[in-house]
Amino acid sequence: MDKRKKIVVFTGAGMSAESGIKTFRDSGGLWEGYRIEDVATPEAWQKNPRLVLEFYNQRRKQVMQAKPNKGHVILAELEKHFDIQIITQNIDDLHERAGSKKVLHLHGQIMKSQSSTDPNLIYTMARPEINYGDKCEKGSQLRPHIVWFGEMVPEMENAIDLVADADVFITVGTSLVVYPAAGLIHYTPSQSVKYLVDPGDFDSTVLGNLRHIKMGASDGLKQLQKELLSVA
């Protein structure tokens, strides 16, 4: 059994932004020029599945062209010293490509597809597109393996279990205001050490012993890496 200090890292859009991956919050609720309601909801899928497929095909190509940034690499390097578990809201695979071994995706993975009728049928994609007419083994149209707005987050209970066992909880690149994921910090043990790495303003007194490193993901994690290793 791994007796090393358990660090749970919760990452959001700010983590991937430094790799050039845009988020729907970049331009007033539009995501690459599309309204969220038109491309990232179950209703959008029912109304225009071809548009939804094409939208995610383009996002997938962007992810494939992007590269892990220094923040991703730092988290992977920390595995040499700590038991690192990453929980991410991001749908890209940059954590894995940087070398992180334990990554839980709360909102799905863009490099996978799933059945539109059986969410348990999930496939790793061999090519960057899902086309209209591509079907699962049960004969239903394949859709992106993404948790859309308005859908349940099936991995939430697993995430809560991981957080409840954390010695250190680090949040990177997310504002801690979007629920249900932002509520994870409330499941941390009372004695755990908590950090927020994000350049935005935040009232850290709301959550007690939370230290706010007011920097971007890469610079903030570089500083935190030094601190963690100095007391390891």
Image: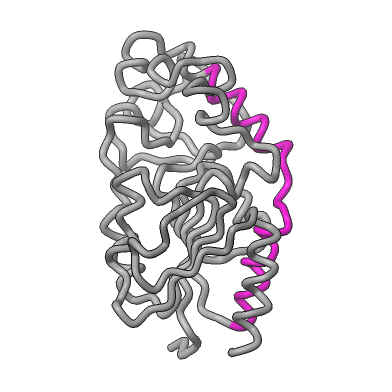
Magenta segment range? 54-81
Task: Residue 197: name its quadrant.
Answer: bottom right
Q: Residue at x 34, y 76 (%)?
A: 165
Tell me residue 94's x, y (percent).
63, 50
Q: Residue at x 55, y 17 (%)?
A: 54
Task: Residue 194: name its quadrant.
Answer: bottom left
**Which SS type dominates the magenta stretch?**
helix
In front of the other: 176 or 107: 176
Q: Quadrant of the N terminus?
A: bottom left
In front of the other: 206 or 16: 206
Q: Residue at x 39, y 29 (%)?
A: 136
Q: Is residue 80 magenta?
A: yes
Relative horizontal placement of residue 62, taking residue 153 as reference (left or right) = right
Q: Is residue 214 magenta?
A: no
Tell me residue 183's x, y (percent).
30, 55
Tell me residue 178's x, y (percent).
36, 43
In this rendering, the answer to whether 23 lies above or below 93 is above
In front of the other: 167 or 227: 227
Colouring of the image: one colour
Count of marks overlaid on the render:
0
Q: Residue at x 50, y 22 (%)?
A: 28
